[in-house]
Image: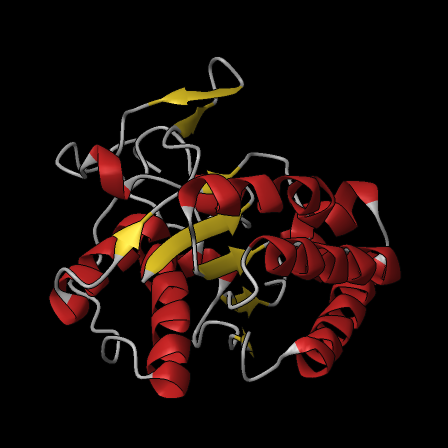
Amino acid sequence: MRIMFVGDSMTIGSTGDFTWRYRMWQHLNATCGDSYRIVGPRHTLHDPAADAATSHAYGDPGFPREARRHLAGWGEGWLHMAPLIGEAMDRHEADTLLVSLGLIDLGFYTDAEQTAENVREFVARARAATPHVRAVLMPVIPNVRAAADAAFGAQCERFNELLAKAVGDLSTPASPLLLASEPAGWETGHATYDGTHPSAWGEHLLAGAFADAMHQAWGVGGPYRPGAPQRAAAAR
């Protein structure tokens, strides 16, 4: 199993973060042994000072470079990842995608319907590269803007409806798609450090939602068992 994380700022993380990718790596080590690899063209965090993905300062310096691999970017969404996914899969031979995208699209680039079309384009390009690819897709998790801006909140809800429909329409036995559940207990005051980006506990919740979807549907690993919440080194 060759896993690629695909996401936006919530997935790439920022200087000092552990990231939910790290939490998933810990979980996979505990439940899958050496039957998997994490792959992808990128490995850094976003550095706020440089406003670029140049940081190597993960919350745990022992997080190995080979496990830091991903296809995620600060300010990138379905619109940006659809053109990249085919080449990334060809190059890194990914067969399992864990995808968390959409909030940035709806916030700055595309409406719910356009974003859903980009989801379908993403899946088509992924399958053109790897016909047997399987993927877990995370719905948009509402942030503080969605709570304060009714129109934006409605777009998030509409997109999640369209995402569920796309998963239902496009999933096949040869290339299954799963819609992850929004992480149980997600509250912006506890699960995020700024109303959007995951705190240490939010990282566990995100990893757990992906891990439980894979375990329940595909028998991958086991149920997610978070350890004691940790705080990122960047003093959130």
Q: Nearer the viewer, residue 150 or 59?
A: 59
Residue 113, relative to residue 59: is it above or below?
A: below
Residue at position x 24%, y 45% in the image: 231
Residue at position x 44%, y 77% in the image: 184
Q: Position of residue 196 (x, y in %)?
A: 55, 49
Is residue 194 visible in the rendered structure shown here?
Answer: no
Extreme residue toward the top, this view = 50
Residue at position x 64%, y 56% in the image: 128
Q: Position of residue 92 (x, y in %)?
A: 41, 43
Count of marks overlaid on the render: 0
**If the image is split into quadrants, where does the N terminus sit?**
bottom left
Identify the image quadrant of residue 83. Answer: top right
Is residue 2 visible in the rendered structure shown here?
Answer: yes
Q: Taking 235 as reference, is 86 left or right?
A: right
Q: Nearer the viewer, residue 206 or 146?
A: 206
Q: Position of residue 177 (x, y in %)?
A: 56, 75
Q: Nearer the viewer, residue 170 or 115?
A: 170
Q: Position of residue 80 (x, y in %)?
A: 69, 39
Residue 33, relative to residue 12: is it above or below?
A: below
Colour treatment of the image = secondary structure
Residue at position x 41%, y 63% in the image: 206
**If the image is split into quadrants, where does the C terminus sit?**
top left
